[in-house]
Structure formats: C-alpha cells, structure tokens
C-alpha cells in the first residue's frame, strides 16, 4: 500500500499540533475523511441538494436516485440480500436504540436478553432500559469476559436458555480490539432460535462484513468510523425481522395513507426512515466505502495488523506496562496502562507532543470495573498511519513516563 499517496488524500493529517507533526491514533473514536468524501459533501450542496422522494422536479429526482443508489451500494458492500434491509440512521447508537425500541413487541415480560461484558454503552444501556421499562420482568444477562479479552463460548451456550429473545454482541471491541468469533456465536444462538445483533461500529472498518456469511440478523454501524461523515449510520436487519417489527418514529416518509382516524405505514426501508433523511450523509458514506474498496480491504487490514503488532511489541518493552486485550484475533486497537500512572496524565503529555490518543473508560465502564482500573490509554490505527508514527508514539510514551515517574 502506498501510504504516502494515501496520506495526501487526508490533508488534515498534514498539520502541527503543539509544534510537532500530528500523530493521529484516535481512529477508534473517529477516522479522518479523504478528499473524495469532503468533495462529495460540497458537490451535493453545490449541485444536487433537494429533498428526496417527494418531488417531480429534476433536482429532487437526482437527489432521490443518488440516495437510493447509496442504499444499494451499502447493501452490496455488506452483502445484504436486499437493499430494503438497509435503514439509514444517525449512527450505531441510533441503530441500536431503534432496534431496542421496536423489539419491545418481541421481547416480553419473562424473557431475557444476553449481552457481553465488553459492550460499549451504546449496546448496553438501550437493552438495560428496555429491561427497566418492564419493571424488571425482562432480565439482562451478561456473558463475562475472560481476562485476556476473549469470550467463553461454552458459557454462552449455557446462557442461551429458552427465555432468551436476543443476543447483542460487539463484532470488535473498541477497548480490547478483540475480533469476536461471530460465525460461531451466531451458530450457537440460532441453534437455540435466538436472533443476533452485532454492534459493528468497529467491525465495519477492520473486518470483512458479509452479513449473509456471518449469518447475523441485525448489524449496526456508523459512517464516521470508516472514513465517512458523522451523522450517518446503518441498521441492517433481515427483511423478515424488519417486516414483522413495528415502526420506530412517526411522521413524513414512513407513512402510506393518513386520515385523522388511522394511518397505515410505508414499506421497507421507508417504514424506518421518518422525516427528511441525511441525504448527503448517505451519498458521502458511499464515497467512503468506495474509497476503502478501491484501496483494498485486505491490504488495509494487513497494514493495520503490522502497526498493531509493532506497537504492541514496542509497548511491551516498557517496564510496568499492562496491555488490556490479548486475544489471538485482534484488530487495530491497543489499550494499556503503565505502572499506576493515570491514563489522563499520560494522554495530556502525549498531546503536548502532538500525539492524539484516547484516555478514559471508552464508554465501557463495566469493562473497566472488571479489570479494576479507572480507564486506559488507547492507541488505534487506520490505513494512513505509519510505522514511523508508532516509533514517535513509543518514544513519546517513554519520555512522558520518565516525567511522570
Ligand atoms: N459501539 C462501539 C463498539 C463503538 O466503538 C462505538 C463508538 N465509540 C459505538 C458503539 C457508538 O458509535 P456512535 O457514537 O458512532 O453511535
């Protein structure tokens, strides 16, 4: 992969922060956007802007066609059987909230939901709220994480009792980097008749996502984690599921006929897209996915893996380091602590040296409690990062640790 050429597509990387060249290692929080995506956004507003689905005029037809083409593109990208299975949302969080709201017709008092101990709050709180709204009659069960950051599938099998109506699990952990064995998990769940939601916020950018091959019933992701814009995301749902579940929000677009007495609802996917959608978001998400495809998924993963392994090896040479997440199958995230140095202090000093990492609980407080830590420092990589940047980062960590010790 020609990283220097790729970096030219991301002008934001070419800047100084606190007098040092920026090293952007906060990609699990959000990725930077290539020029193609930025231009797609401005082109839309320069030439195509119009509301979709409602107009007979030229611009409305252009915008509608582009929006529906983006849906088709996303469907092909994740190998959905039908583009009606692609619902555009604001992002992973909204996708999961949508599902948790409409699943109230399927998950009833006496039922159970299974999540795991490594979930982001976005794939925990919506399910917890669903349980609370039942007055405790729906139970949330949590599959524990092993110390190395893997999941115990034998234990999962035991947890999938006849009461379980949904298994919600992350594809890739944003803290531990663990790539969960999704196919096996889905097989176990389906054997017991349990549908599976994958939180794909990290998965979409660091793993091949083929929803049919994975066998999942629902897959949620955000555009901004895969070089696309903020404010757009996707809920993939199997057609049979989305058809049987009720609407989420009510208003324009999602209706079929309205009278003061009664309203009937539109077909999929519009049933789940009330109001004016984020048209430009969908269009530029398509551009981002095309960019990834053209660069080559496999090449990107191999490059990120090289960065991950190199950074991990170099970090391990630092005395007192603890790395959280040692799964054999890991994606481009390394979370660590050094001695009892507070992650925030280390993060602040790294920032002084131009390095952007994330510190804190990473929206996974229960996981921090499991390891009895306040948080971690997290470096996360993307296609445009380099081994040289890892060296700069490692030297900066050593320098910061020297100052803090
Ligand atoms: N799940 C995981 C695993 C994530 O990493 C994130 C983002 N940090 C989310 C959910 C939430 O994504 P968003 O904020 O884009 O809705």
Image (cartoon, grey):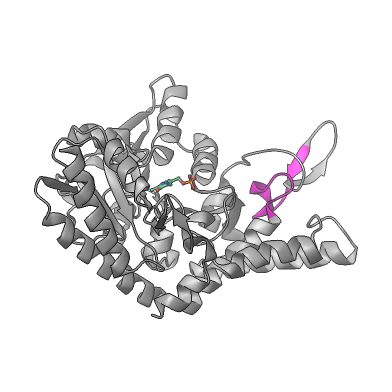
Q: Is residue 180 visible?
A: no
Q: Position of residue 292 (x, y in %)?
A: 48, 71
Side of 25 where 72 appears, left or right: right
Which quarter of the picture shows residue 108?
Answer: top left
**Magenta region:** 263-278
Please tell me whether residue 201 is drawn above or below residue 113 in the rendered image: below
Q: Is residue 216 visible?
A: yes
Location of the C terminus (image quadrant): top left
Residue at the far top: name it: 135
Which quarter of the picture shows residue 387?
Answer: bottom left
Identify which residue is drawn at 41% across, 68% down: 384
Side of 189 where 266 appears, left or right: right
Which quarter of the picture shows residue 280?
Answer: bottom right
Residue at the far front: name it: 19
Side of 380 where 56 appears, left or right: right
Identify which residue is drawn at 67% across, 66% down: 40
Location of the N terminus (image quadrant): bottom left
Q: Position of residue 332 (x, y in %)?
A: 31, 60
Say which of 221 and 399 sits in front.
399
Q: Position of residue 107 (x, y in %)?
A: 44, 35
Q: Position of residue 293 (x, y in %)?
A: 49, 75
Please tell me whether residue 2 is drawn above or below residue 257 in the rendered image: below
Please identify the dominant SS of the magenta region: loop
Q: Is 270 within the magenta? A: yes
Q: Is 213 within the magenta? A: no
Say which of 33 and 297 sits in front.
33
Say which of 243 and 293 sits in front.
293
């Amino acid at each position: 992969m020609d990283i220097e050429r790729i970096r030219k597509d991301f002008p934001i990387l070419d800047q100084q922060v606190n007098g040092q060249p920026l090293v952007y290692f906060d990609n699990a929080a959000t990725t930077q956007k290539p020029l193609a995506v930025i231009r797609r956004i401005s082109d839309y507003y320069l030439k195509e802007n119009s509301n979709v689905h409602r107009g007979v005029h030229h611009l409305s037809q252009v915008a509608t066609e582009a929006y529906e083409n983006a849906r088709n593109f996303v469907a092909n990208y994740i190998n959905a059987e039908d583009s009606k299975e692609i619902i555009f949302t604001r992002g992973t969080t909204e996708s999961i909230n949508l599902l948790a709201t409409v699943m109230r017709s399927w998950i009833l008092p006496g039922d159970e939901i299974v999540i795991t101990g490594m979930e982001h709050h976005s794939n925990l709180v919506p399910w917890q709220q669903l349980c609370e709204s039942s007055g405790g009659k729906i139970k949330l069960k949590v599959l524990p994480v092993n110390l190395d950051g893997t999941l115990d599938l034998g234990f999962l099998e035991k947890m999938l009792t006849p009461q379980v109506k949904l298994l919600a699990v992350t594809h890739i952990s944003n803290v531990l980097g663990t790539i969960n064995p999704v196919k096996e998990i889905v097989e176990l769940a389906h054997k017991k008749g349990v549908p599976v939601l994958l939180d794909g916020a990290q998965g979409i950018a660091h793993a091949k996502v083929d929803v049919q091959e994975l066998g999942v019933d629902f897959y949620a992701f955000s555009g901004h984690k895969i070089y696309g814009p903020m404010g757009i995301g996707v809920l993939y749902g199997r057609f049979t599921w989305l058809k049987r579940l009720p609407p989420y929000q009510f208003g324009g677009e999602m209706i079929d006929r309205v009278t003061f007495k009664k309203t009937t609802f539109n077909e999929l996917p519009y049933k789940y897209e009330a109001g004016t959608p984020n048209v430009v978001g969908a269009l530029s998400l398509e551009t981002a996915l095309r960019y990834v495809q053209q660069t080559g998924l496999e090449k990107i993963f191999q490059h990120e893996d090289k960065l991950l392994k190199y950074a991990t090896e170099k970090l391990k040479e630092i005395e007192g380091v603890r790395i959280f997440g040692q799964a054999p199958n890991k994606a481009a995230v390394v979370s660590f602590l050094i001695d009892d140095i507070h992650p925030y202090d280390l993060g602040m000093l790294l920032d002084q040296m131009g390095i952007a990492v994330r510190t804190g609980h990473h929206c996974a407080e229960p996981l921090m409690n499991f390891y009895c830590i306040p948080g971690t420092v997290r470096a996360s990589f993307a296609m445009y990062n380099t081994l040289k940047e890892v060296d700069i980062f490692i030297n900066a960590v050593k320098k910061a640790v020297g100052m803090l010790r």
